[in-house]
Amino acid sequence: MTFKKWVIEKYINEDSPEGDFARDMQTVEDFPETKVYGYLRRCRACRESVKVYRHLRKQYRHSRGEN
């Protein structure tokens, strides 16, 4: 499962920063499947968005048994 799909399926209905991020991923037409950090930097995302992304990425890797 891709990171994008995992985030959307897990958090789309949550009222949380993670849920906000998932909804952004789903509704932004050009939101990438990969290279999300670079995309966030190009879009000048706020620090909180980058922080949420890093947190979600860590959780995603952990769910896949990665370090």
Image (cartoon, rainbow, N blue to C red):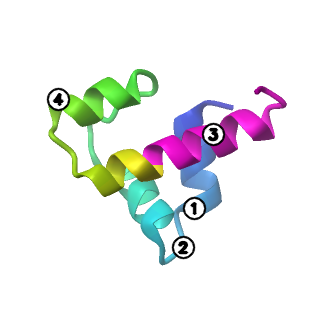
Circle 2 residue: 14
Three-letter amino acid code of the residue under disc 4: Arg
Q: Earlier in the sequence, mark 4 or mark 2?
A: 2
Segment tinted magenta in the rendering: 53-67
The residue drawn where x is 22% and y is 52% is 46
| Other residues around mark 2 within 10 Å, as few (<14) / some (14–19) / many (≥20) | few
Task: Verify CB contact (< 8 Å) between mark 1 and mark 4.
Answer: no
Q: Residues within 10 Å of mark 1 (few under 14, many from 20)?
A: some
Q: Amino acid at mark 3?
A: Lys
- Calculate the distance from the C-alpha at mark 1 to the C-alpha at mark 4: 24 Å
Instruction: Report the residue marked by disc 3.
Output: 58
| 64 up-or-down from 9: above or below | above
What residue do we see at 36% from left, 30% from top? 37
Looking at the rendered structure, which numbered label has been put on residue 42?
4
45 to the left or right of 7: left
Q: Position of residue 67 (x, y in %)?
A: 76, 27
